[in-house]
Amino acid sequence: MSKYRQRIIIVFLFLFTLAGSPACTYKEPIDMPDSRTEVWELQINGETEAKYRMLLKRVRVEKDVWSISGEFSGMADDHIGGRGMVKCNFHGKIDRNNLKADFTGHGDMAVSLSLSGSLWGTLSDSKGSGEWRVSHEEGQSKGQWTMKRIKNNEG
């Protein structure tokens, strides 16, 4: 058999194998509208006062249940750490408008702080509210938060 014919057979077998693999025969529809990045304004009050810009991505897990992740950042004034820039990443879940998320990040305050905390409450399609708590090297802070949606589908 000629080398040319052997190559054609090998390419044909490769394409046949590839087309028959489970990854290529997946038939479920891709649910694109359920994955989107939303832009929110997150305002926190209590032992820290801040207004953050939040980028939130939600992915539908099941009906009325979303996995969420993203980041928020902005200037904060903390009762312990002072005034400075905060940037955090978060992940969590929304289950029938009940939100629970954990976050970690960094604050460039009077001293540089590693932040770890959580926020919980309710979140609709356009607004939300609840409570938050954060720990860092200098102590803890807690308070209330409110959110309002600015826009959908950034970037």
Image (cartoon, rainbow, N blue to C red):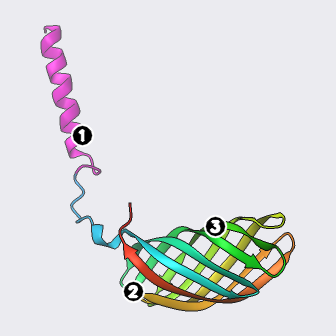
Residue highlighted by disc 2? 125
Highlighted range, magenta: 1-24
**What residue appears at the point 62 percent right and 70 percent down from the top-left corner?**
74
**CA–CA distance in space, label 1 to label 2:** 42 Å
Q: Position of residue 2 (x, y in %)?
A: 13, 8
* Mark 3 residue element: strand
Q: Position of residue 149 (x, y in %)?
A: 43, 81
> Which amino acid, by three-letter code, is at mark 1?
Leu
Q: Earlier in the sequence, mark 3 or mark 1?
A: 1
Cβ atoms under marks 3 and 2 closer than 8 Å: no
Q: Position of residue 19 (x, y in %)?
A: 20, 43
> Which amino acid, by three-letter code, is at mark 3?
Cys
| Quarter of the figure with the C terminus | bottom left
Q: Quadrant of residue 52?
A: bottom right
**CA–CA distance in space, label 3 to label 1:** 42 Å
Q: Can you say whether 103 is above or below 1 in the image? A: below
Q: Can you say whether 84 is above or below 140 in the image? A: above
